[in-house]
């Protein structure tokens, strides 16, 4: 199998997981995406992305604490793995590389 | 959100989720969903948040969350193939949006109708089966013969049931009930008056019952006495709804109610609810002693129920009924009334009884059959669409089939693939149908006057049947295309676009013919039924019911009181005539047994009768054909009769010679055995609904000397100009002179119309179904037309280049389908004619089936088809021929 490729949405989810450092779970990731980058997402698509990332080995999950707000059900916390970190870095480098190729006459980044 | 604490996510959605989600993910996702739900509540309404919760639960269905059974890791090849079939099927459905849409929509409507009808029929069949002893309760009914007049009654003399109980050890107990539906029954509590004489559908709600009534029938009782509640005299059992109405929050047990003319009754128990699927509908049960009532009087005729011991041979009991029954009431035989008795299981009364004098209107098993037939027709039409459209797709899929065969697909596997696709379509249709039912069930309930719920569909038999039908339809629709595909030679299939052979063309034609045949039958039937009902409403009754207001009155009021009331009413401007009578057209008539001149004791005559004051004929504007009206100055008139034309004919007289004939009166009461003379012959008028032929009717004078039957109604003939004012006037006089009884009135035309209510509803339901059936058939045609157009795109282009007009092409493409529709019509006509003629036979007054209805139905079916096909063909033929020729 080739090295797992990471999709655009998965990248965002992975970034949020990394940003929330051990406190990330399905709903929190969805909320951050909606609030911070104003992109509307469904809960199920976030969950699906998380499971896919887990399959690819970019995140790990463990069961966390329960709360009354959740009807006494436990959270599934996601943390980024080293492979995940590497994937993020690779993705960012690839992007930077491509960004640097754009001549200033096309997009003026200032 | 104030009550936020009480709100929780929709339970059904939660259980749906737990059903499909694998265990290890379940809690974490449910938690997230719940948190999200409370989050939503802050910005959305409650309903909106629940809806969002639902949407989320449905969105979560994917390969990560589904349980192992759906996506097993144990890689069986078979499973993989089925997954592939489903994938291909979903793609096919998506690609042919129109055809799949037609299939799914049509089937969904078909399933909806069928499921509704199943609910309806289940309810109809469940009548009275909630009684603990339901299997052993029988009603005694009579087959009476008076002269040549034979009737079936739900009534028997009150002495019959006790006689059976004492003679036949197989009978455990008996209970009798009686109603006084025509009497003005007023209930008094404190100074509050409640008019309880007439319940739903003009049937009495006050029952007089034996103390054993509550042992025979099972109702949910509250009160200390249990089933002994009616053991003491002057006790009454009421329903919860009446208790709430009269006593509000107070405890009704032990309170006393005063019933007009009957006295005080103590409330001893409350029945929570009389189930709607009971043939007995009542609000009050009054404890009654029927003994001694076998002499003619108030409770001579009663409904009698017996309970058999378990394991009794009903036939055996029935064979002894006649002897014991006749011996119990010898006076009937003496009067020339021949009685045969028979038994009806209490569970059969609602659907298969239909006797005269039922306590509450019963239904008819034929309606169940009609509904069943129509809903299956709709399902058949939808299935035919399904088969036709799947077959039409064969040509498009020949390449796929060819490749699959080359790769080694066996015939069995091809069959499975097609099954999977069509079963998938019908499952989707079922899901939509269930949603449709949830949305429309309230409406349907209103329509049928029932309280149906979806719970009935959850019974194991129902679930198995539904799943069975859904799978069966899918298989039927998938089977035929699969067979044809299997015949394809793989090489040919890949090389060129094969089209289904001529045999499938024939099948398609037959199915289209069949579809339109059914549609036309439904159109013609609907039209005729509606016409017949219109006819019943508009046919003259022989008097103008719009101008007559009837008031139920208390027959025990003194003559003076009644006369004062009548005279005062007469003074109101706009009132033409007021009359008091013991019955009224459309409401009730009395039964008389007489011996006209020239007849002997063995040939007594049963006639309907009404006793009135001197103004009856004037108030109802009924013409005299011979003789004279009653004369107030002639004392002898009090024993004389006026009879109608039908009676004259029945007795074999002519109108002129009838006047002066002697008639011997055999009925019950003080004038039994006396004789009077016919003084006049009145014209026939409809004193019953038009279901019945006008029977022999006799009008007698009600006199204070021998008050046989109390007055029941006051009829007021009004000028129809300002009815509103007149009714107000009537009411104010009523309030001043007769305040003890609540005021209630009805225009006689409304009374008559109410009796056609059942048929009215029926015709509406049938019309709705017919429209659906025709719409689905047309949708099928639309699908077929679009296939034909697709197949012939090139041909259309070439024809256009060569100079064909849009009209040319339209007629070319529709021609073959129109021929099929015409054939369908020709088959439908005689079939429809036969069935409608049978149905109309049931009415005494019926319309003739007119030929032009058939032509109209035929023309409209052709017309609708032309438009449907034109919809597709015109678009195709208007297209630029260059594009059409390049197609493919």
Image (cartoon, coloured by chain):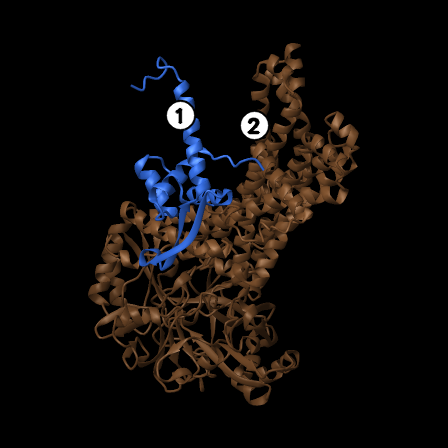
Marks counted in the figure total: 2
Q: Is residue B401 left or right of residue B89?
A: right
Give the residue furthest to the top. B802
Q: Is residue B882 left or right of residue A92?
A: right
Which color was chain A given?
blue
Vertically, is B702 above or below B89?
below
Instruction: Find residue B520 and report its image quarter.
Output: top right
Question: In terms of secondary structure, where does tag 2 sit?
Answer: helix
Callout 2: few (<14), some (14-19), or many (20+) C-alpha neighbours within 10 Å?
Answer: some
For the question of whether residue B35 can be seen, the reply is yes
Q: Residue at x 61, y 81 (%)?
A: B321
The percent position of residue B834, horizontal first and vertical second, equals 66, 47
Q: Mark 1 highlights which residue?
A: A96
Report the mark closest to the observer, 2 or 1.
1
Q: Mark 2 highlights which residue?
A: B867
Which color was chain B given?
brown
Share a chain, discs 2 and 1? Answer: no
The percent position of residue B384, horizontal first and vertical second, equals 65, 41
Chain identity of mark 1: A
Question: In terms of secondary structure, where does tag 1 sit?
Answer: helix
Task: Using the image, tell me which numbered label, if any, was put on residue B178.
Answer: none
Q: Are marks 2 and 1 in contact (CB under 8 Å)?
A: no
């Amino acid at each position: 199998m080739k090295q797992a490729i990471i999709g655009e949405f998965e990248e965002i989810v992975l970034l949020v997981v990394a940003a929330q450092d051990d406190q990330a779970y399905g709903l929190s990731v969805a909320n951050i995406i909606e609030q911070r980058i104003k992109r509307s997402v469904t809960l199920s698509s976030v969950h699906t992305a998380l499971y896919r990332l887990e399959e690819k080995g970019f995140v790990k999950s463990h069961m966390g604490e329960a709360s009354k707000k959740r009807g006494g059900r436990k959270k599934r916390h996601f943390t980024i793995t080293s492979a995940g970190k590497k994937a993020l870095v690779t993705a960012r480098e690839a992007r930077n590389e491509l960004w640097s190729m754009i001549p200033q006459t096309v997009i003026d980044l200032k | 959100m104030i009550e936020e604490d009480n709100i929780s996510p929709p339970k059904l959605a939660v259980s749906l989720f737990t059903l499909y989600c694998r265990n290890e993910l379940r809690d974490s996702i449910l938690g997230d969903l719940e948190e999200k739900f409370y989050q939503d509540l802050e910005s959305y309404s409650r309903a909106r948040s629940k809806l969002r919760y639902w949407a989320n639960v449905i969105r979560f269905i994917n390969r990560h969350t589904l349980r192992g059974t759906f996506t097993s890791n144990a890689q069986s090849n078979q499973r993989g193939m089925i997954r592939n079939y489903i994938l291909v099927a979903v793609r096919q459905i998506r690609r042919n949006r129109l055809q799949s849409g037609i299939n799914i929509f049509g089937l969904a409507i078909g399933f909806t109708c069928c499921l509704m009808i199943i609910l309806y029929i289940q309810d109809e069949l469940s009548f009275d089966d909630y009684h603990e002893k339901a299997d052993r309760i029988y009603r005694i009914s009579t087959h009476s013969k008076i002269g040549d007049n034979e009737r079936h009654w739900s009534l028997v003399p009150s002495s019959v049931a006790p006689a059976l109980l004492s003679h036949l050890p197989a009978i455990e107990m008996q209970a009798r009930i009686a109603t006084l539906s025509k009497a003005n029954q007023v209930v008094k509590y404190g100074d509050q008056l409640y008019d309880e004489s007439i319940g739903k559908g003009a049937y009495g709600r006050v029952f007089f019952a034996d103390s054993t009534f509550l042992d025979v029938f099972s109702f949910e009782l509250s009160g200390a006495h249990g089933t002994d509640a009616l053991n003491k005299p002057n006790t009454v059992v009421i329903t919860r709804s009446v208790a709430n109405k009269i006593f509000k929050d107070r405890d009704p047990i032990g309170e006393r109610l005063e019933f007009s003319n009957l006295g005080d009754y103590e409330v001893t128990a409350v029945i929570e609810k009389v189930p709607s699927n009971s043939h007995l509908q009542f609000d009050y049960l009054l404890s009654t002693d029927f003994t001694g009532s076998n002499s003619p009087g108030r409770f001579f005729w009663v409904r009698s129920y017996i309970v058999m011991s378990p394991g009794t041979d009903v036939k055996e009991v029935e064979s002894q009924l006649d002897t014991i029954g006749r011996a119990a009431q010898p006076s009937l035989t003496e009067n020339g009334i021949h009685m045969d008795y028979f038994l009806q299981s209490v569970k059969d009364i609602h659907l298969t009884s239909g006797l005269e004098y039922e306590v509450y209107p019963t239904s008819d098993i034929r309606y169940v059959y009609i509904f069943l037939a129509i809903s299956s027709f709709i399902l058949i039409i939808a299935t035919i669409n399904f088969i036709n459209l799947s077959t039409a797709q064969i040509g498009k899929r020949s390449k796929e089939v060819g490749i699959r065969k080359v790769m080694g697909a066996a015939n069995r596997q091809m069959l499975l693939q097609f099954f999977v696709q069509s079963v998938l379509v019908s499952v989707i249709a079922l899901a939509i149908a269930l949603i449709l039912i949830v949305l429309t069930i309230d409406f349907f309930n209103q329509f049928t006057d029932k309280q149906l719920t979806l719970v009935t569909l959850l019974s194991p038999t129902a679930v198995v049947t539904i799943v069975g039908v859904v799978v069966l339809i899918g298989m039927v629709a998938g089977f035929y295309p699969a067979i044809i595909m299997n015949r394809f030679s793989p090489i040919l299939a890949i090389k060129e676009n094969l089209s289904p052979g001529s045999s499938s063309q024939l099948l398609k034609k037959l199915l289209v013919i069949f579809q339109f045949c059914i549609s036309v039958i439904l159109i013609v039937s609907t039209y005729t039924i509606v016409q017949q009902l219109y006819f019943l409403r508009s046919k003259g009754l022989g008097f103008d019911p719009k101008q007559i207001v009837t008031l139920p009155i208390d027959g025990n009021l003194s003559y003076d009181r009644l006369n004062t009331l009548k005279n005062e009413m007469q003074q109101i401007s706009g009132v033409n005539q007021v009359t008091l009578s013991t019955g009224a057209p459309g409401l009730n008539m009395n039964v008389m047994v007489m011996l006209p001149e020239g007849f002997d004791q063995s040939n007594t005559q049963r006639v309907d009768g009404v006793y009135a004051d001197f103004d009856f004929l004037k108030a109802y504007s009924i013409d005299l054909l011979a003789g004279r009206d009653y004369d107030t100055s002639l004392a002898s008139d009090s024993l004389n009769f006026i009879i109608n034309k039908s009676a004259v004919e029945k007795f074999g007289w002519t109108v002129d010679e009838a006047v002066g004939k002697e008639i011997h009166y055999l009925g019950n009461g003080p004038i039994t055995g006396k004789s009077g003379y016919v003084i006049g012959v009145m014209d026939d008028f409809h004193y019953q609904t038009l279901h019945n032929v006008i029977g022999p009717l006799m009008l007698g004078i009600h006199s204070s000397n021998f008050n046989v039957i109390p007055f029941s109604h006051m009829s007021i003939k009004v000028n129809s100009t300002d009815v509103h004012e007149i009714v107000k006037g009537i009411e104010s006089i009523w309030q001043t002179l007769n305040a003890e009884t609540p005021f209630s009135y009805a225009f006689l035309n409304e009374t008559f119309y109410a009796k056609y209510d059942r048929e009215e509803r029926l015709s509406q339901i049938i019309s709705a179904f017919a429209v659906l059936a025709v719409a689905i058939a047309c949708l099928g045609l639309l699908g077929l037309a679009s296939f034909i157009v697709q197949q012939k795109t090139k041909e259309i282009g070439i024809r256009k280049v060569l100079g064909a007009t849009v009209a040319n092409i339209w007629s070319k493409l529709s021609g073959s389908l129109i021929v099929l529709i015409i054939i369908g019509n020709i088959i439908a006509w005689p079939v429809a004619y036969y069935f409608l003629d049978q149905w109309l036979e049931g009415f005494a007054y019926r319309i003739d089936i007119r030929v032009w209805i058939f032509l109209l139905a035929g023309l409209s079916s052709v017309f609708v088809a032309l438009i449907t096909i034109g919809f597709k063909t015109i678009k195709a033929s208007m297209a630029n021929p260059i594009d059409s020729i390049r197609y493919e």
